Amino acid sequence: MKRFRILLAAIAAFLVKPLARYAERMFVLSVLPAEYPDIAQFATHLGMDPRSLELIEMPLYHYQVYPTAGLTQLKFFGQGIGGGTTSASPGNAGNALALSDTNLQGPGGQLPSPQMFYVTGIQVVVDPGSSAATTTTFAIQNPTGFNAVAAATVQAGEADVNAILTGGALQLNISNKPYYQDAPLYMMPPSAYIHLEAAIASNSATTAEVLKAKAQARGVLRKLNPGIGIATSQNFDVTLFWPVAVATPSGFNARVGVRLDGFQIRASQ
C-alpha cells in the first residue's frame, strides 16, 4: 500500500508540474501582444539551433611583425581579418590582416557570436626575416647566404630567434584578468617548423662561402590542464612581454605568432 501511495504521488507530480508551467505560460502570453512570438516560434526562426553545438578542433592564431628595434610588449588577437596590418612579405606590406595572419573574425579582441573557444594549449612561433625596409615589413629569410670573403656573420635564423625567445614572457588575459603566464617563450614551442641545420664554408679569403644556421624552440607542447574557456563576446588577448626592448642582432625584422590550440564551439545552423 505504501508503494502504491508513493507511485500515485510521483504520477501526480509528473502531471501537475507541466500543467502548472503551461498555465503560467498561458498567463504570460495572455498579457502580451498577439504578435509576440513564443519560445518555440523564436527557436524555429532563430537561424541556428541553440540546443545543438558544433565542436571543431581548430586553433586560433595571429602573426605580427617584430621590428628590429625591439618591443617591450606585443599584443595578439586585438584585430581580426580586415583590420590591422599584415605580416606578409614585401609586395603586401601595409595591407590589412588576411587569413595568413589570423583566423579571428570580426573587429578583434573577442569572439563573434555565437562562437566560443576552449583553449587546450599555447604555441609561440618566431620566423627570422631578411628585411627592415619599414617597421611593418617582413621578408622571409633565404635558406642560403653568400659572402664574398670568409667572415663571421650574424645569422637571423639563430641569433634573432634566440634573442626573442629567451628574454620574453607570455600572459593570456580573459576579461582583463590574467589566466595563464609562462616564461621564457621557448617553453611554448611550436608543433611544426621548417628545420635546417647546414653549413658549408671555405677557409680561403678570396673564395665565396655559404653559411646558414637556424634555431628553433623544441620540446613538449605546452598543454593547459584543465583548459580555459572563452565565451562569446568576452574580451581576451595574449600579450608577450620583455623587460627591455630586445633588438634583433641581424638588423632585420622578424615575424612572431601565437597559436591557441583547442576547440571552436558554435551553435549549429
Image: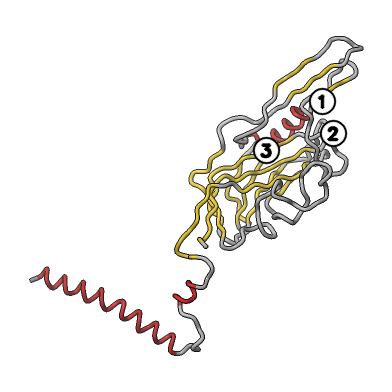
- Label 2 Cα neighbours within 10 Å, binned few <14 / some 14-19 / many ≥20: some
Q: Nearer the viewer, residue 233 or 140?
A: 140
Residue assigned mark 2:
251
Disc sitting over residue 125 in the figure: 3
Which colour style is shown?
Answer: secondary structure
Q: Are marks 2 and 1 in contact (CB under 8 Å)?
A: yes
Q: Earlier along the polypeptide chain: callout 1 or callout 3?
A: 3
In this rendering, is residue 36 above or below 78?
below
Residue type marked 3: Val
Q: Position of residue 87 (x, y in %)?
A: 76, 45
Mark 2 to mark 1: distance in Å? 9 Å
Mark 1 to mark 3: distance in Å? 20 Å
Q: Position of residue 98 (x, y in %)?
A: 72, 50
Q: Earlier along the polypeptide chain: callout 2 or callout 1?
A: 1
Please name the residue shown 70% across and 25% down the image. Answer: 196
In this rendering, is residue 84 above or below 183?
below
In this rendering, is residue 169 above or below 20?
above
Q: Position of residue 188 (x, y in %)?
A: 61, 37
Q: Secondary structure at mark 3?
A: strand
Residue assigned mark 1:
154
Please name the residue shown 50% across and 53% down the image. Answer: 55
- Label 1 Cα neighbours within 10 Å, binned few <14 / some 14-19 / many ≥20: some
Q: Secondary structure at mark 2?
A: loop
